[in-house]
Amino acid sequence: MKAKLLIALPTLLLLLLASAGLSAQSANQVAVNKTWATGDHAVSQAARTITVTVNDPHLNQSTLIEDQGPDRFDQAFTIDDSVADLNDQINIFVESFPIQDRNGDGVVNSLDVDVLSTGTDLPIDIDGDSEIDVLILQVEEDDGVITLLIRDVGGWGALGGITFQLNYNAAVVNDTTDAAGAQPVVVASNQDLTGFGLRLRETNATSGLYRASFILIDDATLVADLDPTNTNLYDTFDENGVGIDLNADGDVTDKAVAVGLYEAAYGGADLSGDAAVFVAAGTVDETVTGTDINGDGDAVDVAVNAGVFHEAAYATDLNGDGDALDAVSQYNAALFLDGKRPFIRVAPAADDQVTVTYSDLNSSLQRTGTTSIDIVSIESLAPGFTGLSPVAGAATTSIVPKLQSDVTDAGSGVSETSISIEVHSWADTNDDGKAQDGEVGPAIAGSPIEQGGFSLSTTVIS
């Protein structure tokens, strides 16, 4: 099989060895998280789960929000006419943000938001004097704050309050469905050449990264276990569908996660005030531990429903309705294409491969004709790297250090022409201020491969 040795070098040329190649994913490309795997159903489902990521900012579409309130601090979209004065300003903290450039002029400002009479497309003009009563003064797109300015209170009288709605475009969590309603990501194997379309969901509203998982399976008798189609709603959740670790046990492979509050998912805070680590009923008080349990931006709610998953706390759309604002108690199978858990048949041991193909989409969600492919080799043993010189973790002051390693693969043998070394610098790819394991920049130019037999080496050009 293909074998790649990845070396990451910080400033002092610390030499590290990884058994599987990872590199910064380019735009409009698909990538899988494993270069090899087994479909043996005796192996854990976590080991047979393949996660697919597409990096394509073209899919990051904004959506028109016709917002009638309340805002994320439960402020109603109502102006009390008994206290409103000319030139008063009112801040609205909208639920859906960042606010996007609606008119296409390259900036986000008051021209991108309309304040209207509730349920209409008309500006607020109570006394009919053709002077608009409420205007948009300022828009803070990243924080989702819209400031209103009262310009005319004539005719408000004793109406008991003026209601309004705000129309604006906001970033939402998108998926990879194209303009024709089809899936541009297709998973296939030698055992299933047709394969299936895999729907990927954006990791957050602005990331441009889309992710989903599928399961390798070598036994047709297990299909029923992976494909329950008797109903579209389930009382337990499948982490593989939503792509996140709901119960905070360190994986995203649990197929039947009970609904409720998992204290591990909230940093281990004792949410219920007892020894239980899972709370499935009743209410909990945020003020006891100072924990924002429902994800509304504060920790002051004294009766938060414990028998649900709070989407805002996970920043994930769990019921497939396009937002992450709900308290969800039932799993919607529509999160999977055709309401089915995705799996692919593979050979039990070796001599198989899974191909994941992404047909690139433009900003109109039309296919461009360009494709990206990544492959998972199916076997029982991983390739091995031995005889690394210098040894892993060593440091050197040489400005042209030579790296060398032997490559073996008892599972399927090594294709000699596929052996390669990539040299990378550590890079803070997630912008958290730290360069950590798995965060590497592009391959360093000027490091020619000196390749021969099943031993390989390279001289690092500084």
Image (cartoon, helix red, strand yellow):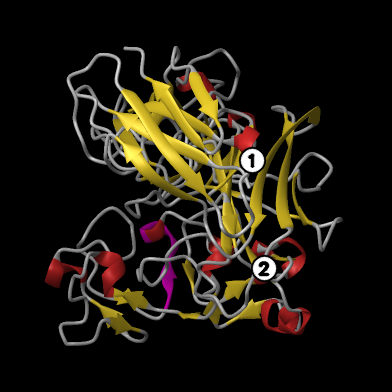
Q: In this orientation, does residue 316 appear?
A: yes
Where is residue 116 drawn, in percent x and y?
A: 55, 35
Residue under label 2: 349
Whether residues under marks 1 and 2 lie with C-beta atoms below 8 angstroms apart, the answer is no
Residue type at numbered disc 1: Thr
On screen, residue 258 versus residue 140, left or right, reads: right
Does 456 appear in magenta? no
- Which quarter of the figure has residue 359? top right
On screen, residue 255 versus residue 146, left or right, reads: right
Which is nearer the eye, 254 or 374?
A: 374
Residue type at numbered disc 2: Ala
Instruction: Estimate how packed mark 1 is, as few (under 14), some (14 to 19) or many (20 or more) residues with alpha carbons within 10 Å.
Output: few
> Quarter of the image containing the C terminus?
top left
> Residue 99 has which mark?
none
Give the residues drawn in magenta, as a range: 308-313
Q: Secondary structure at mark 1?
A: loop
The span from disc 1 to disc 2 (Cα, nearest Å) is 63 Å
- Residue drawn at point x = 36 percent, y = 60 percent: 313
